[in-house]
Image: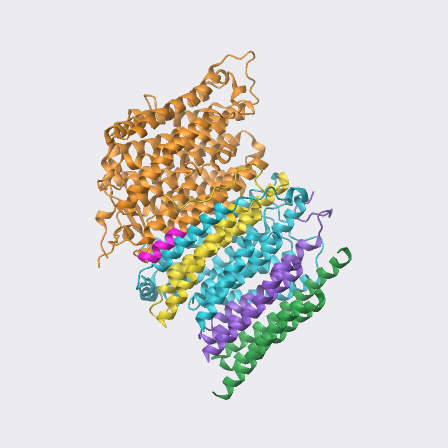
Amino acid sequence: MGLTEAFTLVCVVAGAILFLAGTLGLLRFPDTLSRLHALSKADNLGLGLIVLGLLPLQASLMGGVKLVCIWLLAQLSAATATQLIAGIAARRKPGA
Amino acid sequence: MPESLTLVALLVLLASAAGLAIVLRSAVAIEKLMAVQLLGTGGAATLLLLGAATAQPALADVALLLVLLSAFSCAAFTLGEGEDPGDAAKPDEPA
Amino acid sequence: MTPAYAATPGGLLLVLAVMLPAAAALVMLVLGPRHTRVVALIALALGVVVALATGLQLVRSQAALIYVLGNWQPPLGVALRADGLSVMMLAVTAVVMAATGLFARELFGLDLATADGRLATSFWILLMGLWSGLNLVFVSQDLFNLYVALELLTFAAVPLVCLDGRGETMAAALRYLMFALLGSMLYLLGAGLLYGAYGTLDIRLIASASHHGPAMAIALALMIPGLLAKAALFPLHLWLPPAHAGAPAAASAVLSALVIKAPVFLILRLVADIAPPGSAAVAGQVLAVLGAASILFCSVMALRQERLKLMIAYSTVAQIGYLFIVFPLAGVGDGTTPWGTIAWTGGALQLTSHALAKAAMFMAAGIVAEAVGHDRIRDLGGFGRVLPLTATTFGLAGLSLMGIPPSGGFIAKCLLLTAAAIGGHLWLALTILAGGLLAGGYVFRVMDRALATPAQRLALQRPIPLRLEIIPLVLAVLAVALGFLPLAPFGLLQIGRPDIALAVLP
Amino acid sequence: MSALALTSASLFGLCGAALVGIGLFGIVTNPDLLRRIIGFNILGAGIFLVFGAVARRGAAMGLGGDPVPQAMVITGIVVAFAATALAVALLRRLASLTGSATFDAATPAPPPRSDA
Amino acid sequence: MSLVFDIALVAGLIALALHVVVTRDGRGAILGFIAFGLLLGIGWARLASVDVALTEAAIGGGLTGMLLLRAHAHLGREIAPEAMARGEPRRWLAPAIASGLVALALGAVVLAFPRPAPSLAPQAVAALETTGLGNPVTAVLLAYRAIDTLLEKIVLILALVGVWSLSRDAAWGGASQLRPAVIPEPLVFLARVLPPFGVLIAVYQVWVGADLPGGTFQAGTILAAMALLVMLAGLRPAPPTQARALRAMLAGGPALFVLVGFLGVAVAQGFLSYPEAIAKPLIVGIEAALTLSIAGTLALLVAGPPDKAPAS
């Protein structure tokens, strides 16, 4: 196994573990906001590591750019989604 | 290598789906939404890994779509959330 | 390998029959409400010309018309083909569509404020969609293309049901949509199984396959009930009466006269053209039983209705039943060729005469409702005195439904009865007779009110122009006149049948 | 590879069959019309997966699957979406007019039979 | 390993579908269905149908979810809670048995498909050359079976006319009101930042669709989603449905398709055939026009019937 492949595997496995951590956080943390925090961590880092790991495998520059784009878009979506959800949670709290 | 990538893809998918499975049965709507979000990102990661494993670079496009639209359901969800049944302003049927 | 389909002269007419209304719908969308009616009337005129030309071409060449779209031969591409039966359907559709168009023009013209409004504009666009879908059902040779045709029908027919915007019609439309969707989905599933087994969706290529696995049986068992749900055969008829009764009169006319004939036509093609003989015979028997149940049950239901339009709608389900008892009478699936039998001719005549009579009847009911303001049969006493032409229309159309001479319906039912007697299907013969008696019951019930002399003369809420009353009268007269037609033209129905003999084995 | 593809295709075909059953069950048993509409979508997904299995089995000429059923599925997905949109619009209007999201009359859609 | 993956995926799909059908929580069912759409997209990728995976991800994971969630919120406002209460429990045993039998019969047919499987892949590839395309799915959609695609556009238009016809008479021709009473700040941010990416991806999809997976449906759906996002955030109002430009855009794609189709009668081998020399540019041109039509139609289908009276 070459160095690149080892790098890929390490990154990718680390990413998978982060996803697992995100799920665990979703399950174990006590309140909605801290769960949200766990979720966005998993999103950010897990996908980031997997993208990082897969970058060396890309045949073309275009493929690499696309991967980075995916990660950036995921960041953007996750950030907004988190805020939206936090907003709902905040609005709901007084009533509930 | 493809085998290990597929295995990792399976792990990511299971991790995202496990959260969904547990949350869907018990918790409140927001947490279900969060689990769906997690599945969206996890799904994108899974697709990237599968694409690398099976040498189908086009799968990255699918992942791109998933992340592009993942905030979308979240946005739709918030719309129903803002107004209570008693709200005077009915956005869809103005008087 | 020689191509399975060779385009014939005049094949382009089939493309025009499908694309002309579709293009008209697009033009209407762009030009907007003020020009919709004009575009519709032009398209109707052109469509009638196309149907006429198709008929002439068929008579001249004495062979089915064929067109291969984009010159891509099936199985990769899609072919259109019109045999005698298809051309007859195209012609009936054109006649009823033209009459409906003229009727709708007059009806919407009654109230100038709404002539360019939501109801009228939507009606014209949807009517064109309906026509395109109907024509495609009659000429397409590809099962998936036929699925698209069925969806064209669904999406055009469902909104027509609830154009008046009342809560009941919304519920009726939604229920219709659900039945129709379930039907299309089961049909699509069956088509998928057939593709998996045969690698093609072309009807002729599937029919020419020598070996049939379980896929064929299951596919038919999915597709036929799916289509039955769309055709509203008993016991899947629940959606039809509220839907057809709630639609505007012009829409009810096309829905009842034409739209439900499309799935019937497809069932016929599946059973007669695709199904292996054994399955066809079984399917024919089951369909005949359901058809007979439809005739009896829904005729009784029609007798019990309080409202005129509901009564006519139930009568539609009953009359559709006659088309299904043709299967065993014509000997579909018993190894003989059904195309020359009197039952086959009777079925075709029943289909045509019902289309004309039912369109006339729904238009007449629409006129009554427009003039009187309601359609409660009990309170219609003496409407024949204030609307004599409409009452005549109703009576003439009723003759055909009952099967009383002289009328197209009489010849049709007479032929079916004879076929049942010859074939020894006693129960079917009795059903036909009972159906005729029950139809007599519900038609006479209305005629009795029409001719009654109420204490005070029925008050018209608005004047009805003569032109409006004449259109359904013409249709009703045509339905009766079919009875005077010599049967020879029905020999045309055999042109291009059976399809399989021409097929090339792959 | 071809043996593997075969198994995988059959697996998704079976999944499609199961989804068809689940979708039908949802359509027939759910009185809530919005839920019935979702049931239609699951039924549709099952049907499309059967097509997908058929397409996958037809892999040849370096293609991952037979393109004809794939194209049909794309057409089908879009049509199914349009159907969902029309149904939802009807349902919303029905609810606005009558204040109910069910058919008031107690005449549920009869279960589709696979006889005939 | 890939079989294990497929089994897990299929198990997830079936479990989610069951959950969606039986759960009592209406909104939970919709969220479950969105998740189902995501998994299904991965399933299509596993079936090597990337074109379908793209469509499913865009429609199943995006538009359908929004449509259902909006409908749910609307129904929640319109329907009194007591009317939502369930009546007596439905009979479920007979439907369950019937549905199970259908599924079993289907499963049996799926397993009994002939081997080797019949396939049109060889013919589709062989004919690719005359179309100038590289993606056989696009060739099926726009050449071999172009009639299906064309008429499906008409179906979409009819659906839209049908949805519009559901408006009140006074509002007919007007615009839909998509903007909610309260707009969360992050939504506005999203609606400003995301659409440029979306448009870029859509253009890319149409462009590569001729040779690689992708194409007009996918691109149209993405554009529709972006347009909806902008309207939801209140950045732009929904256009009035009587606007001539809007209607021209909606009808433009299919109209061009019909015109090129009849052009084929004159200069090529019949309706919907393309002259071989310019087949590819013609197809890409049709795709571009169709993309705009599809985008408009899908977005307006989600927006629903107009409910504001037109200006004039």
Residue D112 pos. (x, y %): 44, 45
Name the colour assigned to chain B in the rendering: purple
Q: Which residues are magenta?
A: C189-198
Image quadrant assignment for residue C352: top left
In the rendered structure, the answer to whether residue D1 lies left or right of residue D87 reads left
In the rendered structure, the answer to whether residue C265 lies left or right of residue A95 reads left
| Residue lying at the far right of the rendered structure | A94
Residue D75 pos. (x, y %): 44, 56
Residue C19 in view of the camera:
yes
Task: State the scheme by which the image is colored.
Answer: by chain
Residue at the image point whose x is 49% and y is 28% from the top: C309
Residue E242 in the image: above or below residue C119: below
Image quadrant assignment for residue E88: top right
Residue A49 in the image: above or below residue E266: below
Which chain is represented by orange in the image?
A: C
Name the colour assigned to chain D in the rendering: yellow
Residue E310 in the image: above or below residue E236: above
Quarter of the image with the C terminus of chain C is: bottom left
Which residue is more in the foreground, A38 or A70? A38
The reply to whether the magenta stretch includes residue C407 is no
Residue E220 in view of the camera:
no
The reply to whether the magenta stretch includes residue C190 is yes
Residue A87 pos. (x, y %): 72, 62
Name the colour assigned to chain E in the rendering: cyan
Which residue is more in the foreground, B60 or D5? D5
Quarter of the image with the N terminus of chain C is: bottom left
| Residue lying at the far front of the rendered structure | E93
Q: Main secondary structure of the magenta part?
A: helix
Which chain is represented by green in the image?
A: A
Residue C441 pos. (x, y %): 42, 21
